Amino acid sequence: MTLKVRNRILQGFFIASLFCIATAVLCFIIAFVNKAITPPPDIRIPAFVTKFAFFKYSFAATMISILLIMLYATGAVFICRQFFENTQTSEIIFFIGVVAGCLCEGVRFLTPLYGLWSSFSDFLFFCGRILFTGRIMVPLSFVFAAVASSSEMRQDVERNLLTIVAIGIVFALIVPLNTAKISSAGAVTWGFPRLFLTVRCLFILIAFISFYINGIKQSAPEYKTLAWTMLLIMAGYGFLTCADNFLFMIAGVPLLGCGTLYYLKTLHNLYMWK
């Protein structure tokens, strides 16, 4: 993938993300004016948060967290476009998969509108598929960034990016969705939650180990830094995706923001010397 094509993709994604945010906010405003906003049921995930008073449920925290993730996706793409415009790096292309997965969280913004979460409609199923696709794409994109970013594999980067999307879609199609059970964070739940959580954790572990091994093999401490900053990103992402209280939201924002800034800064330093 040439720099020109990659930069056009980043620019297109930036515009698309702005459109998605504007559409979501407009739909919310219309529903608010029509008094057609129905908070999802108080089904807390993870369940242990119900035992602690300081994890008190807040519908406002849920909606703000979703909006913050969408704004994060837009801001991250803008930063990539500005600081890597003339830098050929496969990791940035795979990072597009990360921010695309974050943008998929925007479908949760729609579930409280006009009672969508209680409709059992095909659109609700569709939203659930999109959400699950995104949650597979985020950790999987880091795996590819760690194992498929060498100069020898640069010519296959488009194919690998499509592979990430395809794997996410396949997972989303085979997982059984339960539209009768919507979490307090506005997410359609799915069957075998522990199994798929384990799969996602394995993706994160593989990415971490691979980044670390790259740092040892290439005598480049920047790769080790990438491993740790990736964990910060995933921790912040994890808090915001299940944030139905202000404590999770407050914890997620600095982890996701600082992790991303250090991740991109480390990448910039790594390729600046190359």
Image (spheres, grey):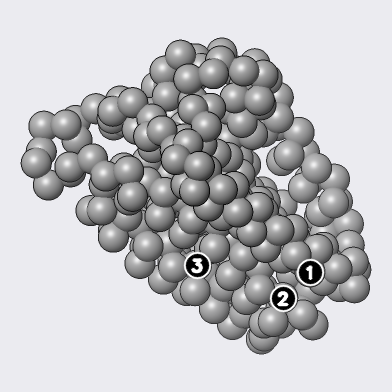
Q: Which residue is mark 2?
A: 81
Q: Amino acid at mark 3?
A: Thr
Q: Amino acid at mark 2?
A: Arg
Q: Is 99 situated left or right of 179 in this image?
A: right
The residue depicted at 88 percent of the width and 57 percent of the height is: 155
Q: Residues within 10 Å of mark 1 (few under 14, many from 20)?
A: some
Percent from the top left, x then y, of residue 36? Answer: 47, 36
Is there a contact, CB below 8 Å, between mark 1 and mark 2? yes
Q: Residues within 10 Å of mark 3 (few under 14, many from 20)?
A: many
The residue depicted at 32 percent of the width and 51 percent of the height is: 61
- What SS does tag 3 mark? helix
Nearer to us in this view, 252 or 267? 252
Nearer to us in this view, 255 or 19? 19
Q: Which numbered disc covers residue 260?
A: 3
Nearer to us in this view, 122 or 222? 122
Camera sees residue 202? no
For marks 2 and 3, the one nearer the N-term is 2
For marks 1 and 3, the one nearer the N-term is 1
Q: Which numbered disc covers residue 11?
A: 1
Nearer to us in this view, 198 or 168? 168
